Image: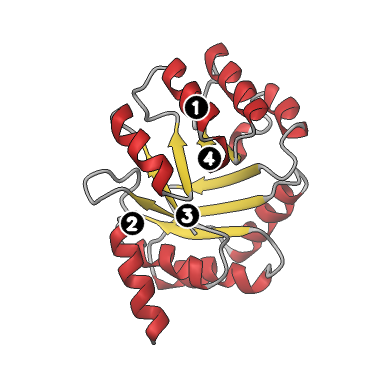
């Protein structure tokens, strides 16, 4: 499955994308729509939406939208690992998100050591998410090896692990081949939410080539 990540695009384009894709990520920190518009979309297409609130500070309006999204049956809510203990309200949300919780770890500087990656996964597992997402800046081939090896080390885990940065694009496709429940793509090359993202059409082409091999 491929999840389309959307940010600063108009509501008409979002309304077009939602019916034709299985999974769509709402990057709440990057979207320019007002929360009333976002809420209406979530209410109508809740089973297709991943709500990702990457805010350092969760304002009242954001917390209210998260609560409503849970009530509407949103597919997943993706909380950042570093927010888990700094935002008290997340504990209440987690209790209501059984089977619908993603916890993500992002490192935009480096890929940590094997030992630290294992520590992170063990710590995140305590929160009982459905999916653990590990995203780290790739600086060399050894970083890629460490990230992909996580799929071998945790075969029973709902794991999505891939690299960040312009040299990490193919790790997103390899993640799917290694067993990730889904991978992320941009709408097109002009609307990436991260430099390593590949457009939906190009991911399909790459997966077809690799499948035939």
Q: Residue at x 60, y 41 (%)?
A: 75
Label 1 sits on a secondary structure element that is loop
**Circle 4: element type:** strand
Q: Which residue is mark 1?
A: 55
- Mark 1–mark 2 distance (CA, rounded to whole Å): 26 Å
| Residue 136 image label | 3
Do residues under tags 1 and 4 come within 8 Å of each other at their CB atoms?
no
| Residue situated furthest bottom in the rendering | 213
Q: Earlier in the sequence, mark 2 or mark 3?
A: 3
Residue 55, given in percent of the width and then of the height, sits at: 49, 27
Callouts 1 and 2 close, C-beta under 8 Å:
no
Name the residue: 74% across, 29% down.
91
Q: Tell me if residue 53 can be seen.
A: no
Residue holding disc 4: 50
In this view, the residue in front, 39 or 54, is 39
Q: Which mark is residue 88?
A: none
What SS does tag 3 mark?
strand
Q: Which residue is mark 2?
A: 200
Q: Indicate left or right for 71 with 182 as reference.
A: right
Q: Nearer the viewer, mark 3 or mark 4?
A: 4
- The tag earlier along the polypeptide, 2 or 4, is 4
Q: Are marks 2 and 4 in contact (CB under 8 Å)?
A: no
| Separation of marks 1 and 4 at Cα, in angstroms | 15 Å
Which of pointers 2 and 3 indicates the residue nearer the eye? 2
């Amino acid at each position: 499955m491929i999840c389309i990540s959307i940010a600063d695009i108009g509501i008409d384009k979002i309304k077009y994308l939602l019916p034709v894709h299985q999974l769509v990520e709402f990057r709440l920190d990057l979207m320019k729509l007002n929360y009333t518009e976002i809420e209406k979309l979530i209410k109508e297409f809740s089973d297709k939406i991943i709500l990702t609130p990457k805010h350092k500070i969760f304002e009242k309006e954001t917390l209210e939208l998260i609560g409503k999204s849970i009530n509407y049956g949103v597919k997943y809510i993706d909380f950042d690992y570093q927010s888990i203990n700094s935002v008290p309200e997340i504990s209440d949300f987690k209790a209501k998100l059984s089977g619908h919780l993603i916890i993500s770890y992002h490192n935009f500087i480096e890929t940590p050591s094997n030992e630290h990656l294992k520590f992170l996964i063990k710590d995140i597992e305590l929160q009982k998410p459905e999916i653990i997402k590990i995203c780290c800046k790739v600086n060399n081939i050894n970083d890629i090896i460490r990230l992909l090896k996580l799929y071998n080390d945790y075969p029973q885990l709902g794991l999505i692990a891939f690299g960040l940065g312009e040299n990490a694009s193919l790790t997103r496709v390899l993640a799917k081949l290694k067993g990730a429940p889904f991978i992320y793509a941009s709408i097109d090359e002009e609307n990436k939410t991260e430099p390593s993202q590949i457009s939906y059409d190009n991911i399909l082409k790459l997966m077809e080539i690799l499948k035939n091999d």
